[in-house]
Image (cartoon, grey):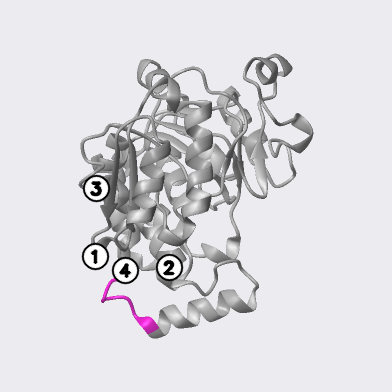
Amino acid sequence: MLARNSELDGALSSVQQLEDRFNKRFGYPWVFLNEVPFTDEFKEKMSAIISGPVSFGLIPHDHWFQPDWIDEDKATSGREHLIKDGVIYGVRHSYRNMCRFNSGFFYRHQLVQKYKWYWRVEPNVNFLCDTDFDPFLFMEENDKLYGFTVSLYEWPQTVPTLWDAVKEFIDIHPEYLAPNNSMKFLSDNGGNTYNMCHFWSNFEIANLEFWRGEAYSKFFDHLESKGGFYYERWGDAPVHSIGAALFARKDQIHFFDDIGYQHPPFAHCPRSAEVRRDKNCTCSQFGSFDYNAYSCLRKWEQVVRS
């Protein structure tokens, strides 16, 4: 979890739910990261509700703050343009720092280095069903690399040149494209343009070694060189999604239908009534985002079937 000291209450809520719904059965370790040191209050209250090991880490300065080589006049102009368009987080440096960190640095942190798998959790989210199986073991045993619960469209104003950078990278390194990849999830015309579909990365269960691998590492370095995290507002969700869809096989990406999850305003609730009953879900299909007009799940299911 990436969290601020001011987010203690929301972080405690998310952690308590996931402990109750899942981790009290398994005792997996938690890692908390922050760009400033965690307060004693944060560490004490969080440690008190966690069943397994817990560690608190400081993010290195170069991994969080805007690089010196970014043209601040150009970045300011980009933020002003997004503000005029009414784009959420259009003005915030901190949001861009977070997106860049989650795109290319969290898996390099000293406290995360020893792990192969992670479940990303954010403050103020809700876990709506019991998870009585081990999703890490499921991923490991079934050769999966990336798991999600919600997929949706990105705001086009935030990524106007992202796909150009992606195509440039593919042209330079076609060898990194996985056989049987998920390009059809990202593009409706064979890769010419980006359709804005992505996996919502505030929930991810994924393999850290995939991000640390050669293909994604060079991909991130290429994106980083363009400055789009600051000149525009490239999110880690489209960046991760594009990386997973292109550099992993489509059968290595998994939709966790049986994990109920809510990041306001959107939620996923298991589709099976039997699953909802057996897993003590506190949600219904009526409120699930799965087949909302803004959801990309139908497109993902078409990719899986193709």
Q: Earlier in the sequence, mark 3 or mark 2?
A: 2
**Mark 3 or mark 1, which is nearer the start of the sequence?**
1
Residue position marked by numbered label 3 in the rendering: 108
Tell me the tag on residue 62: 1
Q: Secondary structure at mark 3?
A: helix
Q: Residue 65 got which mark?
A: 4
Q: Is residue 154 left or right of residue 226?
A: right
The mark found on residue 54 in the picture is none
User: Relative to residue 127, is residue 223 drawn left or right?
Assistant: left
Q: Amino acid at mark 2?
A: Ser
Local secondary structure at mark 4: loop
Residue beneath the point at 41% across and 46% down: 45
Query: Between 198 and 266, which is closer to the camera in this rendering?
Result: 266
Q: Residues within 10 Å of mark 3 (few under 14, many from 20)?
A: some
At x 67%, y 50%, the residue is 265
Indicate the quadrant containing the C terminus: top left, top right, bottom left or bottom right: top right
Contact, mark 3 vs mark 4 (Cβ under 8 Å): no
Q: What amino acid is at disc 3?
A: Arg
Residue 12 in the image: state x and y as whole percent: 48, 45
Query: Against 267, is 81 above or below?
Result: below
Q: Residue beneath label 2, please?
A: 94
**Magenta-drawn stretch, dominant element (helix, strand or loop):** loop
